């Protein structure tokens, strides 16, 4: 599943940051991602918490900034953005079907707030 590999990557980057900065743990991890049908705030947090159990990042909270999903009309090419993920939309211009664009699964790690350490 795509979302599991994404959360694993976020955890991996967080643990590397903790190690590089000689911190004890991470408190907040800020990420941006496009809305999807797979994941919401609580789903992402519980997935992260289960993957991070027994690591230094186990108490970290995910702070997710949701980016709108972009849909493109198959008929006229009109682009529509939406913060609610749906499989497809009706194009507001021509009424035909608008499908999610390829950027739907992009995400970025914006900031990791570290705690503790000897610096
Ligand atoms: Zn259209």
Image (tube, helix red, strand yellow):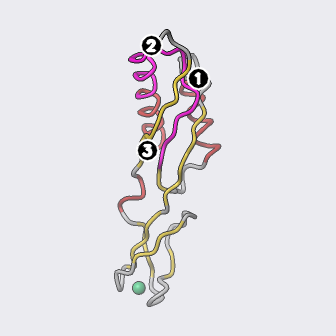
Residue at the image position 41 percent from the left and 28 percent from the top:
13
User: Is 74 rendered above or below residue 46?
Assistant: below
Residue 25 painted magenta: yes
Residue designated by label 2:
22
Circle 1 Cα neighbour tier, 10 Å, few/some/many (<14 / 14–19 / ≥20): some
Q: What stretch is highlighted in magenta?
A: 13-32
Residue designated by label 1:
58
**In the rendering, at what x and y percent does residue 27 appear?**
58, 27
**Mark 3 or 2, nearer chain start:** 3
Circle 2 Cα neighbour tier, 10 Å, few/some/many (<14 / 14–19 / ≥20): some
**Mark 2 or 1, nearer chain start:** 2
Describe the element under mark 3 as helix, strand or loop: helix
Task: Assign the N terminus to one quadrant of the image.
Answer: top left
Q: In front of the other: label 2 or label 1?
A: 2
Rounded to the nearest angstrom, the CA distance separating label 1 from label 3 is 21 Å
**Quadrant of the displayed image that contains ligand 1:** bottom left
Residue at the image position 49 percent from the left and 9 percent from the top:
118
Instruction: Choose top left, top right, bottom left or bottom right for residue 108.
Output: top left
Question: Farthest residue in the front direction?
Answer: 119
Describe the element under mark 2 as helix, strand or loop: loop
Instruction: Choose top left, top right, bottom left or bottom right for residue 14.
Output: top left
Residue designated by label 3:
2
Q: Do the residues labelled 1 and 3 touch (CB within 8 Å)?
A: no
Rounded to the nearest angstrom, the CA distance separating label 2 from label 1 is 16 Å
**In the rendering, at what x and y percent does residue 26 appear?**
54, 24
């Amino acid at each position: 599943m795509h979302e599991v590999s994404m959360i694993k990557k976020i955890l991996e980057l967080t643990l590397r940051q903790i190690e590089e900065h000689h911190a004890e743990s991470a408190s907040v991890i800020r990420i941006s991602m496009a809305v999807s049908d797979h994941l919401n705030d609580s789903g992402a947090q519980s997935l992260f918490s289960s993957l991070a159990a027994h690591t230094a990042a186990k108490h970290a909270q995910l702070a997710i900034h949701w980016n709108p999903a972009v849909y493109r009309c198959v008929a006229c090419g009109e682009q529509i953005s939406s913060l609610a993920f749906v499989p497809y939309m009706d194009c507001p211009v021509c009424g035909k079907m608008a499908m999610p664009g390829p950027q739907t699964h992009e995400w970025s790690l914006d900031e990791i707030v570290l705690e503790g350490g000897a610096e």
